[in-house]
Amino acid sequence: MVTEDSDFPQINKTSLTGESGVTIVKSLVENEFGWLFRPNHLEHDFGIDAYIDVITDKGQVTGKSIAIQIKTGISFFHEENEIGFVYRGEMKHLNYYLNLEVPLVIIIVNNIQRTAYWCAFEANITDKAGKSWKITIPKKQKLNKTAKMELLKHVNPITDYASQLENFWEFNKLLNSDKNRLLFRVSKEDVVNKNCDFILKGLERIQSTSDLILNLKGSVDISFDDYDNDQRELDEIPEVKRWISKIFKLSNCWPYLMTMDKASGFMKLLFYVHVPITRAKDYSISYSPKDSMPFIKELFNKLNEYCEKNGLSEKTNHELTDKIVFYFTDGKIDFTNGGSLIK
């Protein structure tokens, strides 16, 4: 028989009150909204009591969540104004709340009447209150079925990314299956305005997956529109030279992605812009192999950076290093010997 002198563990009434509030909110969220209520374990409670997972009317879990802080008891309703109930928070929670990646809602619960009121926490609705801060939780914002649509306004729109990705994946498939060259065309307007954005974004797009990076090695080229009637060579046109010099500095993909063969256009232009050349009357090109060394070494640096950034093998690095040497110098420079001429 249990007597007054019997010794048993005792329940904390405050904990019971808090648990009753969690139970009330859980019931409202799951029964009125049809959403999922995930309580936070006490040892991980840094001011967040639970998370609400947004679920569609068809039962689809969306990945969108709302963090909630639940305060239960009549004491949280004692201080009020014409608009609502004044909630006072601790300073230690302020930065934590503001740095959350998900929206936060503060809920106060009257566990006697089994009613609850809510307010989305935002910095611009707080006021300093001594050593703490305060906000007003509006009386009109009762946590019930009608609050569902209002709460959704504080969550970023739910997007069917899988459908959107179909086009992205389809284009990837096209890029991966096409063994021909991938040609970017630069307009004269972009050249004159020194605008490299379109090309840089295009290059970024075709390097968005590992498969694309591997499959597009040495298959990209760049051409220039609207210069067919210009009697000068492209590398003799100041605006083109400026554009090429600018974009060369903005990416390290050139020695990896660009084509280097007899039909290549852009890599030859890069070379002509950065290395002193002489054109004969028969349009042949001559240059000093030693004059090409600074540019080629810069290509080596870019290749090293690119391979390291993308986790490419030393085998690939060596393969492209050899390709650069023979493409630009016909193998006439020994870079293992300080860049000396091979006789």
Image (cartoon, grey):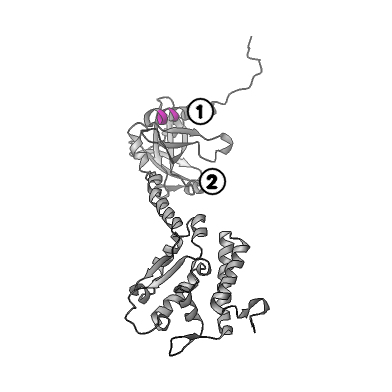
166 versus 82 height, above or below: below
Question: Image point 43% across, 49% down: which residue?
Answer: 123
22 to the left or right of 145: right
Residue receiving disc 2: 92
Mark 1: few/some/many CA within 10 Å (<14, 14-19, 20+): some
157 versus 259 height, above or below: above
Residue receiving disc 1: 19
Question: Image point 62% across, 63% down: which residue?
Answer: 315
Say which quarter of the image contains residue 10. top right
Give the position of the N terminus as an image quadrant: top right
Name the magenta segment's main secondary structure: helix
Return the x and y of residue 135 as percentages of the image width and height: 41, 43
Q: Mark 1: which amino acid?
A: Glu
Task: Point out the stretch of residues depicted in magenta.
Answer: 26-30
Return the x and y of residue 104 as percentages of the image width and height: 44, 42
Front position among marks 2 and 1? 1
17 to the left or right of 191: right
Ranked by sequence position, the earlier of labels 2 and 1 is 1
